[in-house]
Amino acid sequence: MLHNPQLETFVRVADAGSFNKAAEELYITPPAVIKQITSLESGLDLQLFIRSPRGLKLTKAGQSIYRDAQYIIQYCKDALVRAGNAAQEGERVIRIGTSPMTPGQFLLDLWPRLHEHCPDIKFQLIPYENTPENAREILRNLGQNIDIVAGPFDADACARWQCSALGLSLEPIRCAVSVYHPLASKERLQIQDLYGEKFLLIRRGWNDSLDRMRDDLLRDHPQIQIVDFDFLSINIFNRCENSEDVMMTIDNWSNIHPLLKTLPVDWRYEIPFGLLHSPQPSALVQRFLDAVKTVYEI
């Protein structure tokens, strides 16, 4: 990062109008936010906020810093993108972000078919911890440290994440259960098999396809108890294995937990799956994406 990271915290606080709200958005504690702002004010020898019981208000100096901070942050991000693009053009390496939820095996399996179209390009797998904060920052900054992430998406999510997606398939939504669950004895589920079960489903707003499925189930199959979870991580797979709960999943996640069984269901719900990338990919990444389109006949 080329700029002082406290500037980003300052902008987030100014936008939120509250230390607590900014802390929630940054996934850190309010005292940590206050400490960063206090340190920034001390370093600049300026008061940036007027604090009152009704909230925070920017001082005149704060308003000036706010305008310039937005420019500085964006300029530094752009500079890193340009530097990253220049480096990867020389090395001809596509950097693939991998985590349990975004496995790189999908692209590695695809590589033999891509190699004839771009034989000079190599893959570098970049592992990352799949936390809400990391996922948000990685997707917003694709093209800097990571070029491509494979995973589910929808148009609204891409707009939130400030990235683009190359759709490759519509993945059927499956159910995962512990290998010790009574349903694990089946090879395929009927929707009535889920009656009386707790069905783990990611919170509303994460993906439009899942939201439509949720609405259908609530309307037509109230016998299924939908249980929300906030973020797709290894913890939710552990929860599914350690309980009698059933969990939504897709085939790409079938190897994440060895004690979960992925079962097809007799319904027609699907979720878009593809390659997430920067809205302005480098020439190298664009060439790779074009090769993928050729292989998939998109």
Image: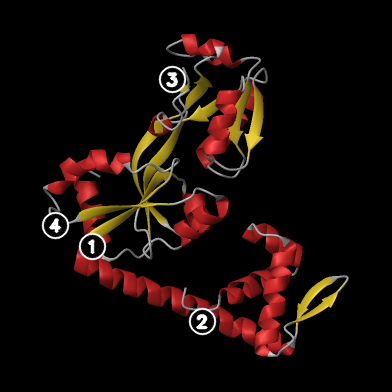
* C-alpha span from label 3 to label 1: 38 Å
Query: Could you tell me if the residues under marks 1 and 2 are in contact, i.e. CB atoms within 8 Å?
Result: no
How crowded is the residue under tag 1: few (<14 C-alpha within 10 Å), some, or many (20+)?
A: many
**N-term-proximal mark, 4 vs 3:** 4
Q: Amino acid at mark 3?
A: Pro
* C-alpha span from label 3 to label 2: 50 Å
SS for callout 4: loop
* C-alpha span from label 4 to label 3: 39 Å
Mark 3 lies on residue:
264
SS for callout 1: helix
Q: State the image coordinates of residue 62 (x, y, percent, origin top left).
A: 69, 84
Judge depth for marks 4 and 3 and give the one in front.
4
Tell me which residue sits at (48%, 76%) in the image: 74
Q: State the image coordinates of residue 18 (x, y, percent, origin top left).
A: 76, 67
Q: Amino acid at mark 1?
A: Leu
Mark 4 lies on residue:
120
Tell me which residue sits at (19%, 47%) in the image: 294
* C-alpha span from label 1 to label 2: 27 Å
Camera-nearest residue between 1 and 11: 1
Is residue 212 visible in the rendered image? The answer is no
Judge depth for marks 4 and 1 and give the one in front.
4
SS for callout 2: helix
SS for callout 3: loop
How crowded is the residue under tag 2: few (<14 C-alpha within 10 Å), some, or many (20+)?
A: some
Tell me which residue sits at (57%, 85%) in the image: 68
**N-term-proximal mark, 3 vs 1:** 3
**N-term-proximal mark, 4 vs 1:** 4
Query: Could you tell me if the residues under marks 3 and 2 are in contact, i.e. CB atoms within 8 Å?
Result: no
Q: State the image coordinates of residue 261 (x, y, percent, origin top left).
A: 46, 21
Quadrant where the image shows the C terminus: top left
Q: Which mark is residue 72?
A: 2
Mark 1 lies on residue:
284
